[in-house]
Image (tube, rainbow, N blue to C red):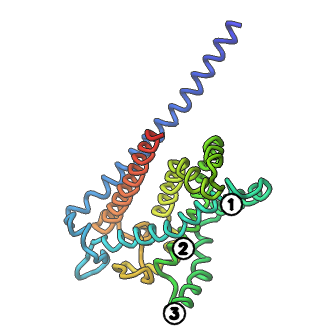
Amino acid sequence: MKRKGNLSRLKEKGIELFFFSNGILAIIILIGIFYLLLSEGLPTFNEVSLKEFLTSTRWNPASYSEPSYGILSLIVSTLLVTIGSLIFSVPLGIACAAYLAEVANPKVREVLKPVIEILAGIPSVVIGFLGIVLVGPMIAKVFNLSNGLNAINGSILLGIMALPTIISISEDAISAVPEKYKEASLALGTNRWHTLVKVTIPAALSGIIAAIMLGMGRAIGETMAVLMATGNAPAFPASIFDSVRTMTATIAVELGEVPYNTPHYYSLFAIGLVLFIMTFIVNLISDIVLHKYGEGQ
């Protein structure tokens, strides 16, 4: 018995050490990525001022006469496509999650949920291809445009890609709301719809916010679909029907051909650093919101 107890404690220690090592490894990788972006991105500002880099709308680092390194148009394009994708995916995702958790019968749920989760496994290049041959022409026809490769096309594609994350996590959060909350609401004379809107969804809000933030992270970091479907025009967008180029698409297009140790090369890492900071701020805000709701509960 004593030997068995020692083996059990040794096993627990081994498991604890395994998870601790994984946590440390994740932190080391994160610090390594940040150091790489910092060490390769900061030399940009030996040639370009930080103010010009962040506030100028002209991005043309390959120009022979006057190279320009302003990324404001890239930042605005990235935010435009990301916010557009959330406007499309958040209401639809929460509605689908509420239907799966509260309305659909178990057989329908067993079929629909795996189908929705399969959407997350579709390669982004396939989604981008659909944007070119299907969604883009439809947008051009409906809004009478010369082509459909623009910000709204990218927003729809990113919204589709964010939907599985938002639906799956939101559905889990809504299903985890204790039954006594719903029973208490129904006992007061309300109907199922009122209970869902006023009790169940607010009670699951922390999980739903986490789902939205993860979906937003997916949208900001996506490259291939927006590279194929948004037109790749590094100009300041005046509307959602203009062609745009996001920060991730700029890095993907130009990094493979840029000469090493040039201002252009360093500026692409500086774009990566700005993108890293943006995603960090999104995660920080989501953490603060989750903590706030956690305290409220």
Locate residue 146 relative to residue 66 in the image: left or right: right
Pick the residue in front: 97 or 129: 97
Outermost residue to the front: 189
- Inter-mark Cα distance, 3 to 1: 34 Å
Q: Which residue is mark 3?
A: 144
Task: Say which quarter of the image contains residue 278.
Answer: bottom left
Where, quadrant-wise, is the N terminus in this rendering?
Answer: top right
Distance CA(mark 2)–CA(mark 3): 18 Å
| Residue type beneath disc 1 | Ile
Residue 63 on image: x %, y %: 29, 80
Mark 2 element type: helix
Residue displayed at 62% across by 53% down: 190
Q: Amino acid at mark 3?
A: Asn
Mark 2 vs 3, N-terminal side: 3
Q: Is residue 254 visible?
A: no
Q: Earlier in the sequence, mark 2 or mark 1?
A: 1
Query: What residue is shown with label 2?
Result: 156
Q: What crowding class fits label 3: few (fewer than 14 Cα within 10 Å), some (14-19), or many (20 or more)? A: few
Mark 1 residue crowding within 10 angstroms, few (<14) / some (14–19) / many (20+): few
Question: Where in the figure is residue 48, as x and y percent of width and height?
Answer: 21, 67
N-term-proximal mark, 3 vs 1: 1
Q: Residue at x 46, y 35 (%)?
A: 24
Q: Amino acid at mark 2?
A: Ile
Q: Nearer the viewer, residue 108 or 119?
A: 108
Q: Which residue in the structure is indicated by mark 1?
A: 118
Q: Give the CA separation, mark 2 to mark 1.
A: 18 Å
Q: Which mark is residue 263?
A: none
Crowd class of label 2 (few under 14; some 14 to 19; many from 20; radius 10 Å): many
Decide: is 252 above or below 213.
Answer: below
Left or right: residue 284 versus residue 110 is left
